[in-house]
């Protein structure tokens, strides 16, 4: 009986879990209209079409940017009749039956055959109604008539720009800000690091860092598109961009670590507050300011902090920094935001001392639910943060990323979160164009968290982002989403590690002058060996990569709506194909050297040299492919970002840091971090050595009348 009851309980729990996670299908996509995010209430009837010319009516008290957005992006047909007028109207909240939260950004669209009316209580609502209206228009100029009433689940829907290991071009930011607004993103958290020209601490600024005027212009452009531009200045930890410089060494918690400030050193606050002031002035933020505060690994390790912690605990040391930093931001009339991982480790008595004037960002990049709800339960203001990218190289692992985004955000909403932030970390040095699917997913599920399912979202994303003429790009995303992990594992380079001991790829020593076979090559020919199986898997995957490359090139040819994005994806696929060739070359070199040795054993020296020549040609072809792959990648990536080594300025950014807390992208001040394995193998040197070996063997060959010398040398 007890077992029966347990089974019933488990079934009930499973049923409850399923009911919480099942998402409803969207109303419009089954009719071929990809709306992102999905509106709340939709009724639709027949179709009409946009006329050849259209009139936009709006009152003087309505923001003219809304009319401008419609005019710039509307798709007109060649027909004279049809929908010829759009009216923008501000109305009372009661007319739309909106509550206080809904009226801030909610809207209603009423589309008839000849006229469309967009109503809202606020300009923001009209702006988002206009974006939805634009998405409704199909490529042939038609759209459904009917009524849409809509509002967001969360009032704050942010994405994260991380500038740690690169700097995107100013005009690229100008381009993507309106594109984010198209999906109703209304905040950008800009992690400044060293990419602002700090007047108070010029040593910190990277070469080519944005001026205050440039950053303010970006912030103004964002504000124009109803996007808050929020600066993030890291501290207490994650302070390497400051503490790596000798001038600030005395502020480190540990002398040998550039990771963290000492919170008992008053000059630490002087430096941070100087940076806060300049970031506030540069962005003009009037709402939030993100002060970081996460992963303070070195907390209370210096002698002074350790002694103080004996009385107040490690939590007390952290609170010294947190309270001072939060108070400084609050005195500026702003609300500080922090990552919450450190405070979630507090004991209850310390957690009760947390400042109330802070928004705590509950981040988790794996879970579908907010599992630690302590801060919510204690009444602190909270937001949630999933991730479109963590540490996987080359391309986000979107199966995990979308799952995290699609369910973690609604879970936070149900706990009372004020908003969401989709983070995009630069640790592995990915290109910004690889983040769009996650960014747009966060827009979808922050606005309408229960709709749609992930498969429907993927289909909507490719059709809306790449255009109706795109073909099979979801296949490309499926291939790339799994590619980074294999690329990393096959090369043996975990993103947090640099040890050669963790690298399975080895190119053993060449044969000696007697063309003895080096047995270290044998595992690569052994079908029961892991290295051989990696090569077999690379061959299998390369067929997929080739297919992905063909799809990308077809889309570039037929529908280049997102040319820069597709160029970047193509460069990544080419890098994957090069890696597969690297693994094949290792296998084929083992064959070549084995055959060369066998021929030498039979005194067939000409054939032996032929096999060595084949090996040399393979090496040279691999080096050529590596160079072409690198050049293609740089050309594609630097369409939107400045050179990492700032060769245009003649002064490289100082990315390389001591080996603690290493990110893949900081292993070099150029793109060597994607080719570090090749550099450590020195394939070019191997090719030169093989040439020298062949020259020596050719010179000695006439002296070799028999193979007796070989038999003797075997003993």
Image (tube, grey):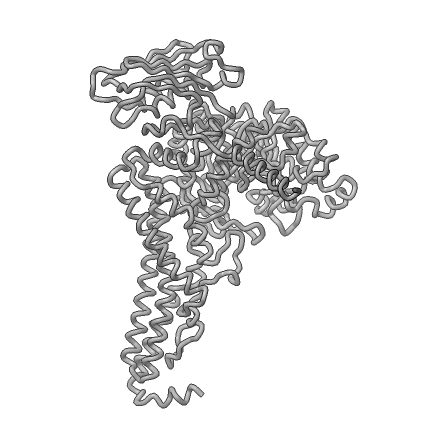
Give the x, y percent position of residue 650: 42, 47
The quadrant in which the N terminus is found is top right
Tell me: 1 left or right of 40.
right
Give the x, y percent position of residue 678: 41, 60
Residue 238 higher or lower than 101, as above or below: below
Residue 484 higher or lower than 201, as above or below: below
Give the x, y percent position of residue 8: 60, 38
Residue 287 appears in the picture as rendered: yes
Q: How many marks?
A: 0
Q: Residue at x 53, y 42 (%)?
A: 366
Camera-side residue of 208 and 10:
10
Quarter of the image for residue 708 reads bottom left
The quadrant in which the C terminus is found is bottom left
Farthest front residue?
A: 1
Give the x, y percent position of residue 394: 42, 48
Residue 178 appears in the picture as rendered: no
Tell me: 101 left or right of 435.
right
Farthest right residue?
A: 311
Q: Residue at x 57, y 39 (%)?
A: 11
Residue 531 higher or lower than 153, as above or below: below
Camera-side residue of 344 and 666:
344
Tell me: 383 left or right of 299.
left
Camera-side residue of 240 and 387:
387
């Amino acid at each position: 009986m007890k077992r029966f009851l347990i089974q019933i309980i488990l079934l009930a729990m499973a049923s409850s879990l399923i009911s919480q996670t099942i998402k409803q299908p969207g109303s419009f996509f089954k009719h071929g209209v990809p709306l992102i995010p999905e509106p709340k209430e939709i009724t639709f009837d027949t179709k009409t079409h946009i006329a050849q010319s259209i009139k936009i009516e709006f009152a003087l008290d309505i923001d003219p940017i809304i009319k401008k957005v419609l005019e710039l992006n509307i798709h007109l047909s060649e027909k004279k009749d049809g929908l010829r007028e759009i009216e923008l109207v501000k109305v009372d909240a009661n007319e739309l039956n909106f509550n206080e939260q809904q009226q801030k950004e909610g809207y209603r669209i009423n589309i008839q055959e000849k006229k469309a009316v967009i109503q809202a209580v606020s300009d923001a609502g009209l702006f988002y109604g206009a974006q939805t209206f634009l998405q409704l228009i199909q490529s042939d100029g038609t759209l459904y008539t009917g009524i849409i009433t809509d509002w967001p689940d969360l009032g704050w829907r942010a994405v994260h720009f991380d500038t740690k290991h690169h700097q995107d071009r100013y005009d690229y930011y100008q381009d993507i800000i309106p594109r984010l607004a198209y999906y109703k993103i209304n905040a950008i958290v800009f992690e400044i690091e060293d990419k602002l020209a700090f007047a108070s601490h010029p040593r910190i600024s990277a070469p080519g860092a944005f001026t205050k005027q440039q950053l303010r212009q970006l912030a103004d452009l964002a504000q124009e598109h109803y996007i808050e531009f929020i600066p993030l200045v890291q501290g207490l930890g994650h302070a390497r961009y400051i503490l790596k410089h000798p001038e600030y060494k005395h502020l480190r918690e540990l002398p040998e670590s550039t990771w963290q400030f000492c919170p008992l050193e008053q000059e630490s606050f002087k430096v941070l507050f100087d940076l806060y002031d300049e970031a506030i002035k540069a962005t003009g933020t009037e709402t939030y300011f993100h002060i970081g505060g996460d992963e303070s690994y070195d907390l209370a390790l210096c002698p002074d902090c350790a002694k103080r912690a004996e009385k107040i605990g490690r939590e007390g040391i952290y609170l010294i920094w947190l309270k001072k930093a939060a108070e400084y931001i609050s005195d500026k009339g702003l609300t500080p935001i922090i990552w919450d991982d450190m405070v979630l480790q507090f004991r209850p008595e310390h957690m009760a001392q947390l400042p109330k004037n802070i928004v705590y960002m509950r981040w988790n990049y794996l879970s579908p639910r907010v599992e630690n709800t302590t801060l919510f339960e204690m009444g602190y203001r909270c937001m949630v943060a999933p991730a479109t990218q963590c540490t996987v190289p080359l391309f986000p692992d979107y199966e995990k990323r979308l799952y995290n985004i699609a369910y973690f955000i609604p879970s936070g909403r149900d706990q009372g979160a004020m908003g969401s932030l989709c983070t995009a970390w630069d640790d592995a040095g990915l290109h910004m164009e690889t983040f769009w699917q996650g960014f747009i997913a966060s827009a979808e599920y922050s606005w309408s968290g229960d709709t749609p399912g992930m498969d429907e979202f993927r289909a909507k994303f490719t059709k809306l982002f790449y255009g109706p003429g795109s073909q099979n790009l979801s296949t490309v995303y499926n291939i790339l989403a799994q590619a980074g992990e294999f690329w990393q594992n096959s090369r043996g380079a975990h993103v947090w590690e640099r040890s050669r001991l963790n690298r399975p790829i080895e190119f053993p020593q060449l044969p000696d002058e007697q063309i003895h076979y080096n047995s270290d090559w044998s595992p690569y020919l052994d079908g029961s060996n892991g290295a051989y199986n990696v090569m077999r898997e690379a061959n299998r995957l390369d067929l997929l990569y080739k297919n992905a490359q063909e799809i990308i090139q077809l889309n570039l040819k037929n529908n280049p709506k997102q040319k820069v994005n597709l160029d970047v994806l193509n460069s990544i696929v080419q890098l994957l194909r090069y890696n597969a060739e690297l693994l094949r070359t290792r296998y084929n070199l083992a064959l070549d050297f084995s055959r060369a040795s066998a021929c030498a054993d039979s005194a067939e020296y000409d054939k032996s040299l032929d096999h060595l020549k084949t090996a040399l040609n393979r090496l040279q072809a691999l080096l050529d492919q590596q160079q072409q792959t690198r050049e293609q990648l740089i050309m594609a990536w630097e369409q939107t970002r400045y050179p990492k080594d700032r060769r245009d300025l003649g002064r490289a950014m100082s990315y390389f840091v001591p080996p603690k807390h290493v990110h893949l992208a900081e292993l070099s001040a150029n793109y060597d971090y994607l080719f570090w394995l090749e550099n450590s193998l020195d394939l070019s040197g191997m090719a030169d050595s093989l040439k020298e070996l062949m020259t020596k063997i050719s010179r000695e060959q006439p002296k070799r009348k028999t193979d007796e010398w070989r038999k003797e040398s075997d003993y």
